Image (tube, helix red, strand yellow):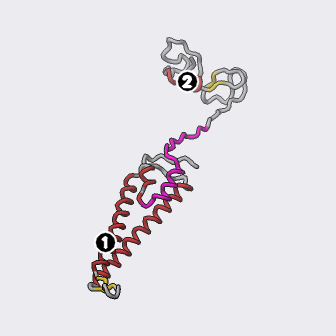
Amino acid sequence: MYCKNCGKTLAENEKYCAQCGTPKIEDSFESSSFKVCGICGSPLNPNDAFCPNCGSASKHVQFKTEPTIDYSPKNRLIGGLLGLFFGTIGVHNFYLGQVKKGVAKIILTIVSIAFIIGSTSLFISSGYTDINTGEFIITDESGITNAIVLFVLGILISSGLSIWALVESILIFVSTNIKDGNDKPLKKI
């Protein structure tokens, strides 16, 4: 073993380096914890510019390690396709683990359907069809107005959900910042 500070060879029973006084720590004495001469293999002090044994210039070598990215196990292609075809009810959000978004989309879808069904019901109950002429006769004009308002709101909510799902699907396909519910990025396609 060698001293991590000065590179002096240490005996197994030594607790401190006799040359520099550095404490012997087992983890710091691996071969990667000190510099050695690239020519003769002699141990070098961390600040040595030249090898004291052969005189060659020592260079500090740094290895650049890329941080490992923990990608999501979810498939980007499946998420994007689910968003395109079933995005208004949030299926792709549930697949990616984004449960709150998925629940919000289901609630908004139910509300938009209820508005459209309610508007149809109000429209039908606001008048009657004359049996002789087949003409729809309006008996309650405020009911018709409410039916139109509910229908327009239902269509606006439904359209908004469709646009939201389309944008999310496109982002799933092309963006590099899309993450699943566990905050892990999706792998590129």
* Amino acid beneath label 2: Lys
- To which residue does mark 2 refer? 4
Q: Between 110 and 32, which is closer to the camera in this rendering? A: 110
Which x, y percent locates residue 180?
A: 46, 49
141 drawn magenta: no
Q: CA distance from mark 1 to mark 2?
A: 79 Å
Quadrant position of residue 110 = bottom left
Which x, y percent locates residue 77?
A: 54, 51
Q: Are marks 1 and 2 in contact (CB under 8 Å)?
A: no
- To which residue does mark 1 refer? 118
Q: Between 49 and 146, which is closer to the camera in this rendering? A: 146
Disc nearer the start of the sequence (1/2): 2
Q: Which residues are magenta?
A: 64-88
Q: Residue at x 41, y 51 (%)?
A: 94
Q: Residue at x 38, y 52 (%)?
A: 99
Q: Residue at x 34, y 66 (%)?
A: 111
The image shows residue 184, relative to residue 144, as above or below, that is: above
- Quadrant for the N terminus in the image: top right
